[in-house]
Image (cartoon, helix red, strand yellow):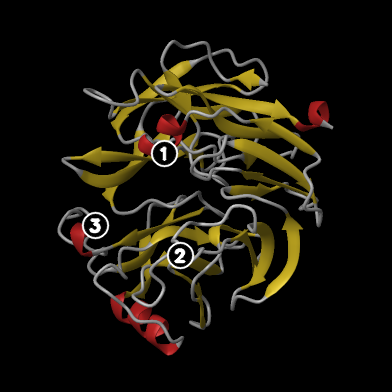
Amino acid sequence: MYQVCDYEGSSMWGMNGGQPESPDEKWLVYARKKKLEGEDSQKTEIWVCDRETLQDQTCVFRVSCGNHNGPSASFVDNEHIVFRDSINESAAFRVLNIYTGEVKYGPIFGKESHCAENGIYPFSISEDFLDKNPGHPEIDACGIYLLDLKNGQIRRIADKETVYRMVVEHGCVPNEFTTSMSHVQLNPSATRVMMRLSVDNCPVFGALGCIDIETGQTHVIPDKPVHQLWYDDDTYMATRQYCAPDGRIEMETSRIQRFSVDGECLETLGGVGNHIDGSPDRQWFVGDRAYPGYPADIFLYRRGEITPAATFGGQNFQHCLWDLKVHPNPTFSRDGKRIYFNHPVSDSRTVACFVRVEELL
């Protein structure tokens, strides 16, 4: 197991499936915090370093954010990263040139997504953000928007009415939080967008919506599988979880599975998991045991097997995991040879780590 930096505070990666590597595999981006709780715990630095040597450590920006997913920093191309900030208690994101320190786009107030796809970065706008982007008059309604990273153009691909209609047509009941969409993600070719939806008749897991950008066709999975990512252009990979009668989310019955956009389970990809990812060739899958009361082991599975081929991580610092919201969020490298993950080393400190897959097997 390798640490990304030698630092007395905490270091952390972003969301599962968010890519900390630059496309040319030259750089890594991660976050540092002096404290995870108490005064100044929101103060966060964004750092880049050489992927292979872990040298050339450079702080490129400072933001304010919590511990859950940190600033969600990821690369959009070889020179630019995207990350979130909190400005006057409102969420915003920026696109920054790591070489010059120039903010290319932003701050744009809205809910950030996992990562960019095909040169496009999606984000969502709820009522809270409607008056916060005067420099972008095109952001004029609740909905889902796309930022073209080449020219900065922003276009809306779904408004509030589209989202509400999609929910109702697929048998769900919208509520006041339905337009506060999260986990907005484009498929690899950027022709479809998915989002997590809050609906009244799915209070535990919510619903998973999908819109075909070209045709407008919609899909919804009620009581969705969790921590979903695109498996390919047409299907998802996610963890199917079940809620026990006592309200507990069951760990032992969870499975990493592949789903159609309408919720049909197509195959089981791995065993117990929560936050997940798949290798680029989709032959390996990784999931963490981030369930209350358990050590946060991370399991590596061969495709289709529910018994792990390898187990790593596994520290049992429940305060850090749950009260401070530091989740492992395992993520494969672009070449599939590494897995990046957050690794609590005490109840008040976590370290951004990675393992080399070939050393596990």
Query: Residue placed at 47% from the left, 12% from the top?
Result: 7
Q: Which residue is label 3 attached to?
A: 136
Mark 2 Cα shell of 10 Å, populated few (<14), some (14-19), many (≥20) = some
Please state which amino acid type lies under the numbered disc 1. Trp
Task: Give the percent coordinates (x, y) of residue 289.
Answer: 60, 43
Res. 285 mark: none
212 lies above or below 304: below
> Is 189 displayed left or right of 183 in the figure?
right
The quadrant in which residue 203 appears is: bottom left
Query: Residue placed at 50% from the left, 66% from the top?
Result: 194
Please state which amino acid type lies under the numbered disc 3. His
Please state which amino acid type lies under the numbered disc 2. Phe
184 lies above or below 309: below
> Is 334 displayed left or right of 164 in the figure?
right
Res. 322 mark: 1
Secondary-structure class at tag 2: loop
Secondary-structure class at tag 1: helix
C-alpha gap between disc 1 and disc 2: 18 Å
In front: 155, or 359? 359
Q: Earlier in the sequence, mark 1 or mark 2?
A: 2
